[in-house]
Amino acid sequence: MRKVTVFITLKQGVLDPQGKQVQESLNVLGYKEVQEARVGKYVELQVEDGPNIEARVQEMCDKLLANPVIEDYHFDVEEAVHS
Amino acid sequence: MRFAVIVFPGSNCDRDMYHAVKDVLGEEADLVWYQNSNLENYDGILLPGGFSYGDYLRTGAVAATSDVMNQVKKHARNGKPILGVCNGFQILTEAGLLPGALMQNKKLSFMCHQEELVVENNETIFTRGFEKGEVVRFPIAHGEGNYYCNSETLSELQTNDQIVFTYRNNPNGSVENIAGIINKHGNVLGMMPHPERAVEALLGSNDGLKLFQSLVKNWRESYYVTNA
């Protein structure tokens, strides 16, 4: 079994109203140093070990996990744990 | 004309849509559950609003992967009229049948009120009954209606006259005030405002009637031509 972690973020240039609100709220709390916040998603998958795992996860991202019109993604596949 | 109103788990405007075409227009319509469905015998497909699959992941993303959407894609290619309203529009973009994406409203809040729209293109099968530039009033009810596309897609939409409705007072931050767009082929329309909730003057507006009437009229005429 492999653990796959997928990070999905809004593309640069796409407005992120939620991130903007988070930034403003942090500023209100006194964290004036925060100039920008962008909110994304984190997905954890447990995937059976097999061939082409990277290619298959990339497909999963393109088909469902991310929307390429507005989002970028990257993922990490953790090494298999042998017991 | 026989309509299929597709019902996903979490759809909630399916009955409004059904009521509009069946009771108000007097056409044939079925509520079609998304599983084990067959869309062959329908002349038009309506994707209603709501919160399919609880808006999990992204609005419309999960519904876009369903088998019924594969059928919708096939019928879209064959030229069958398809209308997606609100969540239906979100599903159409997620399924790749319309360009762009619907993002969270600029002011982050869910909005539910009547908006004035401008008919930008009255040469589609959905809008022939309107005047070009006519101002109509349809309700909106959405949290994610902020239409986004990159500048390349936008200029393509403009060049091909695919922007069908715009907001007079942009409520949600949509690019170029876009409220509704059509595909290049002219048979798939997606829009955030609800024409099906504007079919009776008693309920605030009947401007939506013209949209459904245009569609039915076009279908009758083309049916007559192909079968005469």
Image (cartoon, coloured by chain):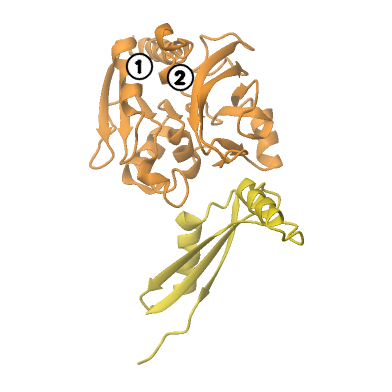
Chain colours: A yellow, B orange
Q: Residue furthest left?
A: B36
Residue ID at (25%, 42%) = B35
Residue ID at (28%, 39%) = B34
Q: Which mark is residue B195?
A: 2
Q: Quadrant of residue B14?
A: top left
Both marks 2 and 1 on one chain: yes
Query: Is B207 or B213 nearer to us in this picture?
Result: B207
Marked residue chain, label 1: B
Q: Are marks 2 and 1 in contact (CB under 8 Å)?
A: yes
Q: Is residue B84 above or below residue A65?
A: above
Residue ID at (42%, 25%) = B81
Q: Position of residue B128 (x, y in %)?
A: 52, 12
Q: Earlier in the sequence, mark 2 or mark 1?
A: 1
Q: Position of residue A11 (x, y in %)?
A: 65, 54
Residue denoted by label 1: B20
**Circle 2: residue type:** Pro
